[in-house]
């Protein structure tokens, strides 16, 4: 068949910014990590003329690097529509960002409080709350429950009634994924916010309001996220899923929470200049209170530039990459809408093809229903690991396992708790999807017939 030209994004042009297409790789494992455009890898090298630590030198080079580093926070803040860089803390990844929230709330939990999370969370948004309730706080003599909301097994939708029944006046924190990395479902965050508000923690003022943490690891790469409109208290994501190289994750938090709470790490640069005495330490202003020790300077600069480059890739222009400052909201929203539309079209194309394969079950929303750009499935009579290995032999990159969404796999009764997953990004072409489907048909066709009852 003739190659399909994409109406929403010029994928052919976008792919020219990456090395992987020339190697023949069919990268359909983008929910794990995306590929870096060449410009971003080259950017590391181009920073050497001013290679220096930040906030730790008076040289022109140090001042230049400090400026680039600090401006990166402005870019990140504007990407999320955070009011300013003061709401942004950079860590290594989503996992570390969520653990930083755990740490900052340690002193806040009273005996009898609870945290509510869901069965569709990635382990990085479940295990910390499990550990808090079962291991950490008991050692301080405090009993805090970790409650877990169900999801609909057929559609993958978060069971909002169940969630609401778990939230009460002792719910300090509600932790929900913005998009499941296994089911692909996106819980309605406005409804979750309303639940956390309506029936949540009884504040001393008489107001009912629980803190809301959103795991944005799969949400931020494929949609525009406005933390103010969503009114989330915390949102975490990882840059390695948004075209940037590995190493930097973000925690957005409301400024007053960052002002009040305890930093995750203590040491140099997180204290106000000169304000350390044996009996008095004063912390630095935001966001540097949350930047103890030498940070991942180049990684942060390159990561912020990844966001700027995304805008240029979508537009086919060179307006944003290499510049600094906050990004206009309308530009971010329009670019992310186009990425969302494109990845949606690729996902639907793949979903339709998967449904044609006998014995194949796709988890989560039905074809045509909203989902993030990933499809997890099993094939009757075949171990998901064997599917992924078969696909790999045919040049198709996928992921098999539980994708760290162990609770949801167990909940669906999958034994072993595993599925195979294809996931898409802005550079995914219809040819990629068709190649993956073709390979999967071959892998499925090579299955040994199963005895009746195991299909
Ligand atoms: N949450 C979700 C929904 C994810 O998909 C991932 C990455 N698979 C994470 C959290 C963890 O991200 P990281 O490994 O970068 O900490």
Image (cartoon, helix red, strand yellow):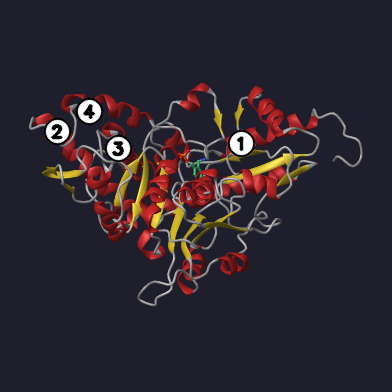
| CA distance for labels 4 and 3 | 12 Å
Compare marks 2 and 3 and give the one earlier in the sequence: 2
Numbered disc 1: secondary structure: loop
Say above or below: 300 vs 407: above
Labels 4 & 2 near each other (Cβ < 8 A): no
Labels 4 & 3 near each other (Cβ < 8 A): no
* 4 vs 3, front mark: 3
What percent of the width, then of the height, locates residue 14? 43, 37
Numbered label attached to residue 2: 1
Q: Nearer the viewer, residue 435 or 420?
A: 420
Numbered label attached to residue 56: 2
Say if residue 345 shows up in the picture. yes
What percent of the width, then of the height, locates residue 39? 33, 31
| CA distance for labels 2 and 3 | 17 Å
Numbered label attached to residue 47: 4
Compare marks 1 and 3 and give the one earlier in the sequence: 1
| CA distance for labels 4 and 1 | 43 Å
Say if residue 1 shows up in the picture. no
Numbered disc 2: secondary structure: loop
- Mark 3 — residue? 300
Q: Is residue 378 left or right of residue 248?
A: right
């Amino acid at each position: 068949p003739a190659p399909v030209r994409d109406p929403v994004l010029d994928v052919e042009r976008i792919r020219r910014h990456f090395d992987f297409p020339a190697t023949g790789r069919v990268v359909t494992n983008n929910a794990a990590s995306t590929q870096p455009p060449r410009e971003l890898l080259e950017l590391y090298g181009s920073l050497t003329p001013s290679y220096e630590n930040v906030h730790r030198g008076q040289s022109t080079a140090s001042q230049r690097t400090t400026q680039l580093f600090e401006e990166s926070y402005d870019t990140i803040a504007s990407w999320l529509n955070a009011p300013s860089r003061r709401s942004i803390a950079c860590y290594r990844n989503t996992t570390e960002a969520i653990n930083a929230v755990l740490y900052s709330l340690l002193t806040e939990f009273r005996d009898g409080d609870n945290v509510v999370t869901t069965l569709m969370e990635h382990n990085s948004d479940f295990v910390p709350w499990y550990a808090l309730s079962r291991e950490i706080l008991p050692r301080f003599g405090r009993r805090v429950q970790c409650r877990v909301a169900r999801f609909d097994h057929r559609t993958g939708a978060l069971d909002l009634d169940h969630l609401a029944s778990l939230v009460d006046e002792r719910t300090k924190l509600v932790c929900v994924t913005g998009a499941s990395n296994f089911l692909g479902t996106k819980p309605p965050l406005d409804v979750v916010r309303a639940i956390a508000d309506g029936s949540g923690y009884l504040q001393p003022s008489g107001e009912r309001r629980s803190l809301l943490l959103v795991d944005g690891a799969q949400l931020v790469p494929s949609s525009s996220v406005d933390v103010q409109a969503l009114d989330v208290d915390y949102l975490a994501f990882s840059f390695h899923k948004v075209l940037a190289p590995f190493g930097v994750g973000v925690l957005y938090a409301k400024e007053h929470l960052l002002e009040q709470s305890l930093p995750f790490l203590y040491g140099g640069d997180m204290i106000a200049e000169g304000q350390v005495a044996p009996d008095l330490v004063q912390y630095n202003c935001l966001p540097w209170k949350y930047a103890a020790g030498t940070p991942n300077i180049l990684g942060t600069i390159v990561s912020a530039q990844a966001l700027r480059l995304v805008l240029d890739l979508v537009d086919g222009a060179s307006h944003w990459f290499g510049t600094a400052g906050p990004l206009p909201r309308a530009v971010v929203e329009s670019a992310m809408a186009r990425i969302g539309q494109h990845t949606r079209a690729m996902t639907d194309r793949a979903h339709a093809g998967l449904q044609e394969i006998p014995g194949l079950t796709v988890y989560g929303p039905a074809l045509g229903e909203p989902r993030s750009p990933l499809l997890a499935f099993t094939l009757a009579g075949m171990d998901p690991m064997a599917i992924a290995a078969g696909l790999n032999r045919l040049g198709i990159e996928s992921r098999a396992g539980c994708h760290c969404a162990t609770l949801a796999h167990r909940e669906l009764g999958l034994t072993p708790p595993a599925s195979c997953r294809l996931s898409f990004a802005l550079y995914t072409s219809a040819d990629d999807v068709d190649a993956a489907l073709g390979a999967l048909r071959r892998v499925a066709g090579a299955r040994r017939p199963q005895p009746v009852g195991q299909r």
